[in-house]
Image: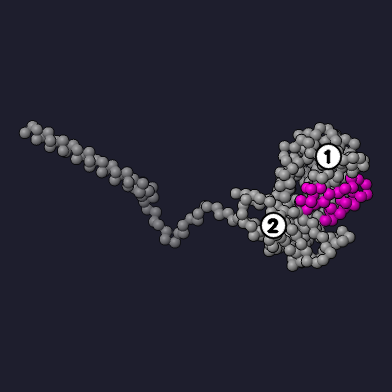
């Protein structure tokens, strides 16, 4: 009898645990819904209310490429009046469809880089004059910043401004230390990349021999092309100024950068020839054709893409950047 009673009580105890477990499980499942009902028990569902839009951001990748082209005749006169049908663009030899052509005299943004390294000691007066000559040719709306570079520093002497006067700091420049030319180009390119103007230029006044940069020549070229800027380089080498033997490949480097970006290498370091060259540079930047096309190469591989711009009319010359680096995933 006592044994049967023990079995009976044990059964009741185990059944209680089982039922408690079921009750707790049901409570656990139902608690969120019940809590929601308690929080807002009387709020009816609005059948007209639309679901909230998703906050997911959709990004659209485009392959739009902008190319600024200068067109001249055999006498180096600027050619105007060309239409979109007069141009042809090849990318890696593949024809591209031109979507837009702008031919208005739009203002430009430029950065002047003045070499103040030790090798420029007896040429600083020419560098100052070059800066002043270029600024004097500006027109309304043109924006120019001025930098100096030597040693480890690239120093801003004037932020982007319409001023036609050289900043006071230009007259206080001293020649010292080594030449961080590539660092200066990278800094100017980064600044120009933030500008709203579609026509951009870097004016380099230097003997061209880099001796101190953290950046490489390839990085300087890549940054300039990414900013869609053209390099106009004034040859301040001893060979150009004093007609001496060539000491380094500085002039060749600047010539290469100018050609790759679609700018010009100016061989006249001073005098009336330089003033004429600067006047021509300002006129050129104002009268360029700005072409936009969508690349048929959709690969985001960071590789070099060669660009060739042609015009249908015979006897004309076209100068534009030689290519660009594709974006990379």
Q: Is residue 262 magenta?
A: yes
Q: Mark 1 points at which residue?
A: 248
Residue 127 percent coordinates (x, y): 87, 42
Residue sitting at 62 percent across and 50 percent down?
A: 301
Mark carried by residue 92: 2
Part of the protein shown in magenta = 255-284
- Front-most of residues 52 and 7: 7
Q: Which mark is residue 110?
A: none
Residue 313 counted in the magenta span? no
Q: Using residue 34 as the reference point, say whether residue 201 is left or right of it.
A: right
Q: Quadrant of the N terminus?
A: top left
How many discs mark residues in the rendered view?
A: 2
Circle nearer the N terminus (2, 1) = 2
Q: Is residue 87 visible?
A: yes
Determine the CA span between mark 2 and mark 1.
33 Å
Position of 314 with respect to 49 (left or right) is right
- Give coordinates of residue 197: x percent, y percent: 74, 53
Q: Position of residue 319 (x, y in %)?
A: 79, 56
State the residue at coordinates (85%, 46%): 234
Residue 128 visible in the picture: no
The quarter of the picture where residue 66 lies is: bottom right
Residue located at (78% from left, 34% from top):
151
Is 60 on the left or on the right of 307, as rendered? left
Element carrying mark 2: loop
């Amino acid at each position: 009898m006592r044994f049967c009673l023990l079995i009976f009580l044990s059964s009741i105890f185990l059944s209680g645990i089982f039922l408690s477990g079921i009750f707790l499980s049901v409570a656990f499942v139902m608690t969120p819904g019940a809590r929601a009902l308690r929080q807002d028990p009387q709020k009816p569902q609005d059948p007209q209310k639309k679901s909230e839009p998703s906050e997911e951001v959709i990004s659209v990748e485009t392959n739009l490429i902008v190319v600024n082209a200068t067109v001249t005749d055999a006498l180096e006169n600027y050619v105007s009046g060309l239409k979109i049908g007069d141009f042809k663009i090849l990318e890696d030899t593949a024809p591209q469809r031109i979507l837009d052509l702008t031919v208005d005299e739009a203002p430009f943004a430029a950065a002047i880089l003045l070499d103040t390294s030790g090798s420029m000691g007896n040429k600083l007066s020419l560098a100052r004059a070059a800066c002043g000559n270029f600024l004097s040719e500006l027109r309304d709306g043109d924006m120019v910043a001025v930098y100096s570079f030597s040693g480890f520093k690239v120093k801003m002497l004037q932020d982007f401004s319409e001023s036609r006067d050289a900043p006071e700091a230009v007259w206080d420049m001293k020649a010292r230390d080594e030449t961080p030319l590539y660092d200066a180009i990278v800094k100017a390119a980064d600044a120009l990349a933030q500008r709203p103007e579609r026509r951009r230029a870097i004016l380099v006044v230097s003997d061209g021999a880099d001796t101190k940069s953290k950046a490489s020549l390839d990085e300087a070229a890549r940054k300039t092309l990414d900013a869609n800027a053209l390099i106009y380089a004034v040859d301040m080498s001893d060979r150009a100024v004093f007609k001496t033997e060539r000491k380094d490949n500085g002039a060749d480097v600047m010539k290469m950068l100018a050609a790759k970006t679609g700018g010009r290498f100016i061989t006249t370091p001073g005098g009336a020839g330089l003033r004429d060259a600067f006047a021509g540079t300002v006129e050129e930047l104002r009268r360029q054709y700005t072409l936009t096309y969508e690349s048929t190469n959709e690969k985001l591989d960071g590789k070099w893409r060669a660009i060739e711009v042609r015009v249908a009319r015979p006897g004309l010359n076209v100068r534009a950047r030689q290519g660009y680096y594709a974006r990379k995933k």
